[in-house]
Amino acid sequence: MTPGRSDTAISFDKVGKEFDGRWIVHDLDVDVAAGTIVGLIGPSGCGKTTAVRLATGVYQPSAGSVTVLGRHPTDLRAGERVSIGYLPQQPVLFDELSVMANLRYHAGLNGVGQRRRRRLDDVLGLVELHGEESKRVRDISGGMQRRLALAAALVHEPPIAILDEPTAGIDPILRQKFWEHFRTMRNRGRTVVVTTQHVDEAIHCDSIVVLSEGQVIDVGAPSELRRRAFGGDRVDLTLTSIADQPTVARIRDLDGVTGVVVTGPNDLRAVVAGGSSDELVAVLESIGLEVTQSSEPETDWNEIFIALMRRRGATA
C-alpha cells in the first residue's frame, strides 16, 4: 500500500451487529481507503468499539459483511494478520512482566526481527516510556499501561493500524505527538483507523465517520462536514458601517448567502454556500458596503458535531 493508491483497506458492507435482540451497529456501509487516516467519532455507546471489533474479527457480523485486505478478518492467513496492529480498549498486557518484556513479547509475536532493539527504542520514545522499561506492568499507572499498549500495537509497523481510543486519558501534548506520528504513518502509505470521543481530533483525519446510536450520521473530509453542518463556509466580516438590520437584510438577499448573524456593532458572520470569502467581500463592496476585515472563524468541532446530529435528527 503506497500513498495515493485508491485500494480499499477495510470495507463495511451494510454491516450490523446484534446482541440480545438489540442492534448495536446497523447498516454500516463504509470503505476505508488505504493510506488514509479515518476517524470514527461519536459519543460513548454509539458503536465505535463494536465497529473496530468487527474489522479485527473479534466479532462476527449479524448482517452484512466486513473485509480487510479483500478477505474476511477471520480468513486472513497468519502472515496477513501481522499486517494489522490492533489497540483494544482494554490493554492486552501481562501484569507480572516488565514494560520491556511485554513489548518484546508483542514484537516477537508479530515477527519483528532485524534491528529489533532500535524498533523497541523508537516506540518507547513515541509513548514516552524511556526509563520505565524494568517496571512491572502492575506497578505503573493506567495511563502508562495505555501508552504501552499503543507501543505494542505499532511495534511491528503494521500496514493497517486499528486503534480504539488511543488518546483516551492522554495529556494534550502527548495527544498531539501521537497524531503527528499517525500522520507520518499515513504519509508512508499506512492506513490508520482511530476511534475517539474527542471530536476536536476530527481535524487530523482525512475522512471522518460520525456515528450515533449505531448508525452512520455522516461521512466525509473535515472541510466537507464543516460545510454540511453549517450549510456552507462561514466568514466573519467587519464593516466600516453599522451592522444594522437593513444591512443584514441586504447581505442575506445576496446569491449564495444562506445565513447572516450580527456579532458586534460593525461585525457579522455570514454563511456562504458557494464562492470564497474574497468573492463575498468583492460583492459587498460592489453594493457599497466596505469591509475592513474578513476571516474564517476557528472550527469548533463540538459545534459541528451537534449541528450534524440535529440535521440528521439524531441524538448525541
Image (tube, rainbow, N blue to C red):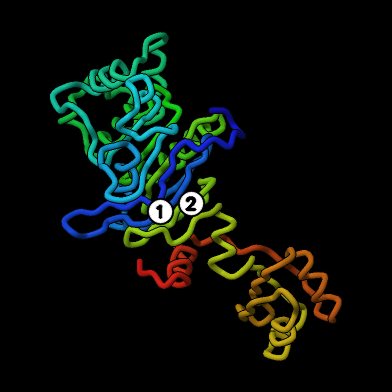
Work out whether residue 10 can be spotted: yes
Residue 148 screen position, x and y as percent: 29, 30
Q: Which residue is mark 1?
A: 41
Residue at screen point 24% across, 22% down? 102
Residue at screen point 66% across, 82% down? 265
Residue 279 screen position, x and y as percent: 79, 66
Q: Amino acid at mark 2?
A: Ile
Residue 47 in the figure: left or right of residue 22:
right
Q: Quadrant of residue 272?
A: bottom right
Whether label 2 touches label 1, CB < 8 Å: yes
Compute the Cα span from label 2 to label 1: 7 Å
Q: Which residue is mark 2?
A: 208
The vertical placement of 292 against 160, above or below, is below
- Which residue in the rendered view is the most extreme toward the top? 114
Residue 300 screen position, x and y as percent: 50, 62
Residue at screen point 22% across, 32% down? 92
Q: Amino acid at mark 1?
A: Ile
Residue 250 screen position, x and y as percent: 74, 85
- The secondary structure type at the circle numbered 1 is strand
